[in-house]
Amino acid sequence: MKILLIGKNGQIGREILKLGSKKNTVVALSKKELDITNWKSTREVITEVGPEVVINGSGYHVVSDCENFPDKAFELNTFALKNLSDICAERKITVVNFSTDKVFDGKKNKPYKEKDEANPLQVYGMSKLAGEIVAHSYCDKAITIRTCGVYGGLEGSRAKKGNFVLMIINESKNKKSLEISSEQFASFINAEDLARITLELLSKKVDSGIYHVVNEGYASWAEFGDTITKIANLPLTVVPKDRLGSFSSVKIPLFAGLDVSKIKSIGIKVKPWQDGLKEYISFLRSQNVL
Amino acid sequence: MKIFVIGKKGQLGQEIERRCGGAPYKVFSYGREDLDITDHKKVSEVVGKVGPDIVVNCTALHASLESEKKPGGMFEVNAFAVKNLALVCAKNKIPLVTYSTDYVFSGMKGVPYKESDHPTPVQMFGISKYMGELMAINYCPDSIVIRTSGLYGGLRGSRSKGNFVLNLIQESKTKKTIEVSSDQIFSPTYVEDLVAASFELLKKKARPGIHHIANGGYCSWADF
């Protein structure tokens, strides 16, 4: 398979490049090398590379920034996908985009399935939902992977300056206790698992559509944080704190667990979230981060 | 009752102004020239100064080939400006009434759409209006979103494209026959009825959220 990967330095992109290169030809570009909000150069690059699959790992992910700059959020998360989808449709290319639990309002209180109705509460989720609709309206070979709570690599996400696990490890160096919200539930995934499952979906040539991909199960952020401190043996006490759902004044879903029964039903193995976390922490140990 | 209308030159805005021109209503209406809805700060200032009991947003940028290629401007008006209006209304504790469209649906259902059907827009215009709906409802919980379809009314119709009735009358002056699409089914709606029903909704203190208002029934454009 010849894959064009956009956003090779992102948390997801790095893992896809690492794993995907084993069996495929991966042409990987950074956000700088290909800015998909530039419609013309996107067309030129795809035409030149001629891939069978485009994996779009770029996105405007910082929730509070999206709130302040909806035009920028939509430019990258929605409008760029219109152009990308048009190009892929013309050339019969499969295009993979990543989306988020934040397309949901969290009121279900049970893990969300792919067919549950979206109702995003903030600009970020709206721009990602609009991006999903654009992808599937303009390209019948689009695959949307909704994920949640991604962590991976040595530096995590560049835009978010790390990831939750790295943040907890860092905090443990100069704090004895840390308050973490107990009312917000999420699912989580090791970026390596996310990359592996994404590539598996492609090699299985699954139908176009939406797929929820996380490590199985869900927990509050407080429980997730507490589990990190236990697995990593950190001298940090997690204090569960009910923040009443506020997250730097932007509304986010209180329950953001994703149901993975669809990918399991097509034969994809999904680890429990605790196992994904253990593997990441072993990786960090092997790299002397811990 | 002070009514703040944005989009006074459109067929909807004109009808609201006509209907509410007198006690107990006082209409403050603005066109594109007086108040640019994408100027968030200005909108907030003017609403604050007028102190209305309700804001009615009749603006929209319609589907065009150009907006498929450059959707930014359309989203500015149909979505981001609605977010700002919703925030302004929430801050002033007043309801926002904003209009949406049958274009939020794909048309695959085959029978008339209900408010509870999942939106499934298939082009940038419908997506931008759907985002406007979400922004209204999530940033101002008292919002009323009215979806309508095939609107016609007034002497000139809408600013950008007149309306279907006027266009047909015009065509009849120079043509003996005309081809009209028979495959697209919709609910034509007279703007006077839309405005009357909108006010009835408000009088009845209808629940916030989405309401469909159209004349009863449906037909193809050819039937119409």
Image (tube, coloured by chain):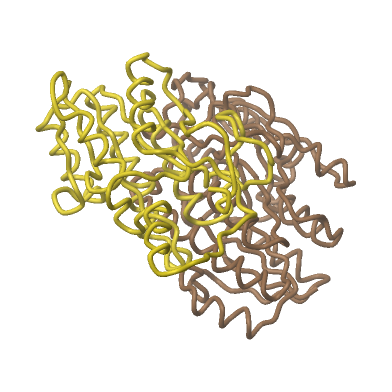
* Chain A image colour: brown
Left or right: A82 with respect to B195?
Answer: right
Chain whose colour in the figure is yellow: B
Residue A258, how many percent across, how many down? 68, 35
Residue at x-position 67% and y-position 74%: A90
In this rendering, does residue A8 appear at all? Answer: no
Q: Determine the residue located farthest toward the left in the rendered image.
A: B49
Residue B203, how many percent across, how many down? 32, 16
Residue at x-position 71% and y-position 61%: A140
Compared to residue B23, the image places residue A56 above or below, namely below
Residue at x-position 71% and y-position 43%: A212
Residue B110, how many percent across, how many down? 69, 41
Quadrant in the picture for residue A224: top right
Quadrant in the picture for residue A51: bottom right
Quick one: B103 or A91, which is closer to the camera? B103
Quadrant location, the N terminus of chain B: top left
Residue B67, how many percent across, how many down? 43, 63
